[in-house]
Amino acid sequence: MSKFPEWLSGLIRLQEFGGDWSRYVNEVFSLFYRDFIQSKPVLRGRQVRCRRDPICDGKEAGFWHCVSEGSEEESRTPDLRRCERIGWIRTVIENADEPEVEVWTTRKRNDDRLYLWLREEYLVVLGLRRSYYQLITAFCTDYEHTRRKLRRERDRSRKS
């Protein structure tokens, strides 16, 4: 990413933990736990909550969706770029009104979703629930075909 906005936290890297995955994932989880379990960010007057079940290795399902990738729930694989940016999720949510963040609503599989896209490089996806938002996932948008798809969705959303 180009120069970070001042409000965005730094990256947390595996190298800082001597390559020890167990220590690293526990630290990444502790940040997620602080940001979404101990307290909850608020967006547009609604809390943002994470999906708790199923708990795997003592960590909520919402956490695993933010640090791993894959279409099959049981076989998702860790994504270090997602892990490094775990602290970005809450700050993007809390700074959704900043010019670096584009926000729009779309419909996915009969579910209304709110997209928060930081400089077309990092996406936070929230599900709209009756009285709160549910954190669905967050990831880097590295591929041009992904950015094109998201631009089309954003543009369609703005037209309707």
Image (cartoon, grey):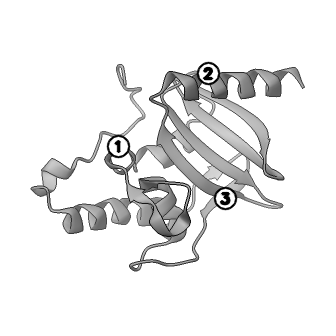
Taking the spot 43% from the left edge, 74% from the top edge, the residue there is 59
User: The residue tagged with tag 1: helix, strand or loop?
Assistant: helix
Which is more toward the observer, 44 or 20?
20
Please identify the quadrant where the N terminus is shown. Answer: top left
Find residue 30 and report its horizontal and vertical position in percent: 35, 66
Which is more toward the observer, 81 or 86?
81
> Is residue 12 depicted above or below 145 in this figure?
below
- Tell me which amino acid carries mark 2: Arg
**Disc 3 or 1, which lies upstream in sequence?**
1
**Badge number at residue 81:** 1
- Tell me which amino acid carries mark 1: Arg
> Is residue 154 depicted above or below 14 in this figure?
above
**Badge number at residue 148:** 2
Tell whether 55 sits left or right of 105.
Answer: left
Which is more toward the observer, 43 or 124?
124
Label 3 – label 2 distance at C-alpha? 25 Å
- Tell me which amino acid carries mark 3: Gln
**Badge number at residue 134:** 3
Label 1: how many Cα within 10 Å (few below 14, some 14–19, many 20+): some
Label 3: how many Cα within 10 Å (few below 14, some 14–19, many 20+): some
Find residue 156 and report its horizontal and vertical position in percent: 81, 24
**Disc 3 or 2, which lies upstream in sequence?**
3
